[in-house]
Image (cartoon, grey):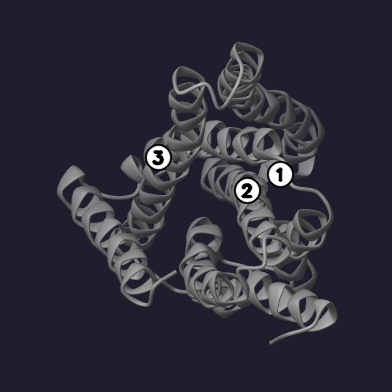
Amino acid sequence: MIDYWQLVLLGSIAGFTIFLGLPIAALQNLSAKKKGFLNAFALGILVFLIIDVFSHAWESAQGSASAMLEGKSTIENVILNLFALFGGVAIGLLGLVLYETKTMKKSFPQILSLENIKVGDDHLHQLFYEANAYKLAMMIAIGIGAHNFSEGLAIGQSYIAGEIGLAILLIIGFGAHNTTEGFGIAGPLTGLINKPKIRFIILVGLIGGGPTFVGTILGSLWDSQLAYILFLSIAGGALIYVSMLMYNSGRKQATNAVMMTGIFFGLVAGFLTDLIISLSGA
C-alpha cells in the first residue's frame, strides 16, 4: 500500500523518464540520410501516439454514449464529451498554428539580418533549418505534454478509486512510454551544427514530462472524464499538426524509402512498448 505522497513521487518519476530519451539531441556530424532517418523514427513514434491517444479518447466518449442507452448516463453528458473530443482536436491544431505564427515572426526577422545575408545562402539555409528544428521540438513537447497530462489524470483517478495496483502499473507503464517520447522530442534536434543548449533540453523535458506529475495530483483530487477526453484530444490535434511538419522537414533530408523505414521502426517501437505495458497488466 502506498500513501499519497509516494504516489505523487512515483507520478513525477513516470513523467520525467522522458529525459532518458532526450540525450540523442546531442548527436552531431550526422549525414542528411541519418538525420532524415532519426526524424522519421521520431515521426513513427508520434504516429503511434496519435493512434493511442484517439483510441482512448474515442473509447471514453463512446462509452458514455453506450451508458446513456443503458440509462446510466445522460444525453447532456454525451454531448459534453463529444464537444470535448472535437473541441480538443481543434484547440490542438489551431493552437499550434498560432504558436508557429508567433515564433516565425519573432525568429525569422533576426535570421534575415544584413550580416547573415552577407554570409551566403548556405548559411541562411542552416539558420532557417536550426530555427525550425527548435520550433518543431517545442511543439512536439507541447503536444506530448497534453498527452502526458491525461496519463497523469488516469494515475491519480485510479488511486482515488482505490485501485492502487492499477495506479502503480500505470506509473511503470507510462514511465517506460515516456522514454520513447523523449526520442520524439529530440528527433528534430539531432545533427545540428551547434549542440542544443542544456537549458532548452531541460525546458522541453519539463513541458513534455511535467504534466504527468501535475495530472497525477489533479487526478487524485478531482475525477473528471470530461477533462481526460479533452486533454487527450488536444494532444491528438497537436500531434497531427506536428507530424505533418516533421514529414515535410524529413522529406527535404532523405528519400521516401528512408522516411518510410524510419516511420516503420518508430511505429514498431511504440507498439512494442505498449504491448509490454499491456502484458504487465497496466
- Which of the two residues, 74 or 140, is positioned nearer the viewer here? 74
Q: Residue at x 82, y 76 (%)?
A: 4
Position of the C terminus by quadrant = bottom left
Q: Residue at x 60, y 43 (%)?
A: 132
Q: Is residue 72 left or right of residue 222?
A: left
Name the residue beneath numbered marker 3.
Answer: 55
Crowding at label 2, few (<14), some or many (≥20) Cα neighbours within 10 Å?
some
Q: Residue at x 56, y 19 (%)?
A: 82
Residue lying furthest bottom: 1
Residue type highlighted by circle 3 = Ser
Question: In the picture shown, does residue 49 fall above or below 251?
Answer: below
Instruction: Name the N-terminal-most of marks 2 and 1.
Output: 1
Question: In the picture shown, does residue 77 fall above or below 251?
Answer: above
Question: In the picture shown, does residue 79 fall above or below 6?
Answer: above
SS for dot 2: helix
Give the number of the mark in front: 3 or 2: 3
Crowding at label 1, few (<14), some or many (≥20) Cα neighbours within 10 Å?
some
Whether pointer 2 and pointer 1 mark residues with C-beta atoms closer than 8 Å, the reply is yes
Residue lying furthest left: 257
Residue type highlighted by circle 2 = Leu
Question: In the picture shown, does residue 178 fall above or below 1?
Answer: above
Q: Is residue 184 left or right of residue 10?
A: left
Name the residue beneath numbered marker 1.
Answer: 116
Q: Which mark is residue 127?
A: 2
How far apart are the two marked residues, 3 and 1, measured between alpha carbons?
47 Å
Image x and y of residue 97, in percent = 65, 24
- Which of the two residues, 259 or 217, is positioned nearer the viewer here? 217
- Which of the two residues, 225 or 176, is positioned nearer the viewer here? 225
Image x and y of residue 16, in percent = 68, 74
Give the number of the mark in front: 2 or 1: 2
